[in-house]
Image (cartoon, rainbow, N blue to C red):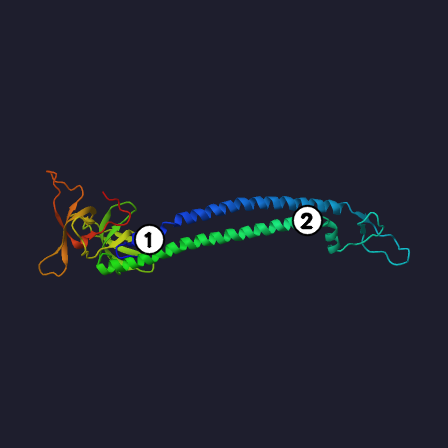
């Protein structure tokens, strides 16, 4: 990746030819499927015809019962025999090899079936090879994406733009979404099970004594956000409530007297007009602010 190129730009460049390669492989496998199906039908027809002719020949054989005794006084055969040649009076009990030789009087038909089998199997192997090549193309893109995301995460962490969720501790403040699609509200962590990912939290509304047991996907542990700039979109707790609403940063976080970290951030809440149509600046504790949660609908 060049110095002026972003991770996204580099990744999109790597994808430029991928759709065409995958499309070409899929079309090739589709064409091979059609050819393979046609060969399979032809082979099945020839096999059925070969079997029909073999059955006809076998059923046409004259089965001769053994005589009670042979002229030379020897014991007759225990099983009936067949006369494979009407011109010869000899009665035999043919072996499997002899029957195969008797049936296969048209070796070209059997050779044609075997050739079709070989061609079909070869085409199936080629389809598998193309499918493996397609998988390798997609897998290489996924691996590249994983590597780029890892590098991007390290870059953002080094600049302070990436927030890493630390281990939740009792009494940590958190934003929770009790039900899918509901508003985010302020809560306090009671406990967190890292094995199951479940949080136990208490509602921060002073008039509520509700206890929530929620998965990690519905909990955002709140921490100090230092890297905020004017105009950034955030979700913040509206003053005198425990509900989060969309807002934009009006003034970057600032420190208060006697503190080393920022305590408040000034925001403008969406649709917070006064009677004159003016949206007031409202200071909000930095611990009550979070970046827009995943899936949130922004106005």
For the N terminus, give its image quadrant: bottom left
State the image coordinates of residue 231 (x, y, percent, origin top left): 17, 48
Instruction: Evaluate whether residue 164 shows in this view.
Output: no
Q: Which residue is mark 2?
A: 108
State left or right for residue 179 relative to residue 248: right
Q: Which residue is mark 1?
A: 11
For the C terminus, give its image quadrant: top left
Q: Nearer the viewer, mark 1 or mark 2?
A: 2
At label 1, counting other C-alpha atoms closer than 10 Å, the crowd grade (few under 14, some 14-19, many 20 or more) is: some
State left or right for residue 22 relative to residue 210: right
State the image coordinates of residue 44 (x, y, percent, origin top left): 62, 45
Given residues 2 and 279, the one toward you in this image is 2
At label 2, counting other C-alpha atoms closer than 10 Å, the crowd grade (few under 14, some 14-19, many 20 or more) is: few
| Residue at left offset 75%, top offset 54% | 98
State the image coordinates of residue 125 (x, y, percent, origin top left): 53, 53
| Residue at left offset 64%, top offset 49% | 113
State left or right for residue 184 relative to residue 147: left
| Residue at left offset 23%, top offset 49% | 185
Q: Tag 1, which secondary structure? A: helix
For the residues bearing labels 1 and 2, Cβ distance under 8 angstroms: no
Given residues 136 and 176, the one toward you in this image is 136
Instruction: Evaluate whether residue 23 shows in this view.
Output: yes
**Distance between the Cα atoms at labels 1 and 2?**
57 Å
Q: Tag 2, which secondary structure? A: helix
Q: Quadrant of residue 226?
A: bottom left
Given residues 236 and 122, the one toward you in this image is 122
Given residues 143 and 169, the one toward you in this image is 143
């Amino acid at each position: 990746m060049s110095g002026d190129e972003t991770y996204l730009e580099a990744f999109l460049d790597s994808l430029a030819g991928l759709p065409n390669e995958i499309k070409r492989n899929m079309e090739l496998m589709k064409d091979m499927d059609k050819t393979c199906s046609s060969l399979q039908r032809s082979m099945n027809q020839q096999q059925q015809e070969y079997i029909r002719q073999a059955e006809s020949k076998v059923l046409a054989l004259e089965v001769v019962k053994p005589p009670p005794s042979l002229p030379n006084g020897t014991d007759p055969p225990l099983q009936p025999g067949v006369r494979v040649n009407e011109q010869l009076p000899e009665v035999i009990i043919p072996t499997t090899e002899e029957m195969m030789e008797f049936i296969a009087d048209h070796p070209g038909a059997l050779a044609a079936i075997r050739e079709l089998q070989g061609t079909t199997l070869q085409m199936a192997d080629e389809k598998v090879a193309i499918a493996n090549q397609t998988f390798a193309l997609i897998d290489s893109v996924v691996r590249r994406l994983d590597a780029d995301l890892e590098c991007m995460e390290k870059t953002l962490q080094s600049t302070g733009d990436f927030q890493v969720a630390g281990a939740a501790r009792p009494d940590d403040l958190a934003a929770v979404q009790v039900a899918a699609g509901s508003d985010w509200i302020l809560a306090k962590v009671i406990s967190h099970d890292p094995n199951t990912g479940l949080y136990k939290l208490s509602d921060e509304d002073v008039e509520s004594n509700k206890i929530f047991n929620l998965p990690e996907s519905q909990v955002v542990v709140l921490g100090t956000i230092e890297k905020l700039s004017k105009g950034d979109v955030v979700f913040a707790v509206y003053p005198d409530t425990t509900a989060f609403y969309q807002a934009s940063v009006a003034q970057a976080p600032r420190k208060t007297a006697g503190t080393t970290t920022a305590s408040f951030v000034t925001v403008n809440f969406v649709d917070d007009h006064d009677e004159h149509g003016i949206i007031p600046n409202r200071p909000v504790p930095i611990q009550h602010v979070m970046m827009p949660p995943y899936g949130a609908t922004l106005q």
